[in-house]
Image (cartoon, rainbow, N blue to C red):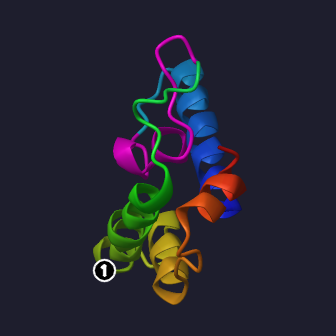
């Protein structure tokens, strides 16, 4: 889980750097799979968004059946075996969500 948070932070840094230098930046993750969107969604005022926050079985279902599938897919779609996408795919092909309880997952990500 912390690796996913790290990747989101890395994407934010790269996007900011691109903005500062006037370059285009293509995020690695689709918006719905970024940590900041599924783990800690915020309102436009940067406050926690209870309407978009996944809890319990909804959170476990998203992680197991959407997020992990998406991350594993990078192993097949990456065009360069040395790219970050290929490495993410390789990592998540080998790991899975060990938390079947949504409350435990929520506690880990700080909800």
Q: Which residue is drawn at 56% across and 70% down?
A: 101
Instruction: Name the spot of residue 106 as percent of width and height, x first.
Output: 61, 54
| Point 60% across, 59% down: residue | 103
Q: Across the whole image, how many numbered discs are drawn on residues?
A: 1
- Left or right position of 8 against 74: right
Closer to the camera in the image, 101 or 23: 101
95 vs 37, left or right, is right
For the point 59% across and 27% down, the residue is: 16
Tell me the residue at 53%/88% (across/down).
Answer: 94
SS under mark 1: helix
Which quarter of the figure is the N terminus placed in?
Answer: bottom right
The magenta region covers 26-46
Residue 27 drawn at (x, y percent): 43, 44
Q: Does the magenta stretch include residue 60?
A: no
| Residue 104: % across, % down | 65, 63
Q: Is residue 28 magenta?
A: yes
Q: Which of 31 and 81 is in front in this view?
A: 31
Q: Residue 7: where, in percent of width, then height?
A: 60, 53
- Pointer 1 residue: 76
Figure quadrant of residue 76: bottom left
Indicate whether 17 appears above or below 80: above
Mark 1: few/some/many CA within 10 Å (<14, 14-19, 20+): few
Q: In this view, does 62 lie to the left or right of 110?
A: left
Which quadrant does the C terminus fall into? top right
Residue 82: tell me if it is visible: no
């Amino acid at each position: 889980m912390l690796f996913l948070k790290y990747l989101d932070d890395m994407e934010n840094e790269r996007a900011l750097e691109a903005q500062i230098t006037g370059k285009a930046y293509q995020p690695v993750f689709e918006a719905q799979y970024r940590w900041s969107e599924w783990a800690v969604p915020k309102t436009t005022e940067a406050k926690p968004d209870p309407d978009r926050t996944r809890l319990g079985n909804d959170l476990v279902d998203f992680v197991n059946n959407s997020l992990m599938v998406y991350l594993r897919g990078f192993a097949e779609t990456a065009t360069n075996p040395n790219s970050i996408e290929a490495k993410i795919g390789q990592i998540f092909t080998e790991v899975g969500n060990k938390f079947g309880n949504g409350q435990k997952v929520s506690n880990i990500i700080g909800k």
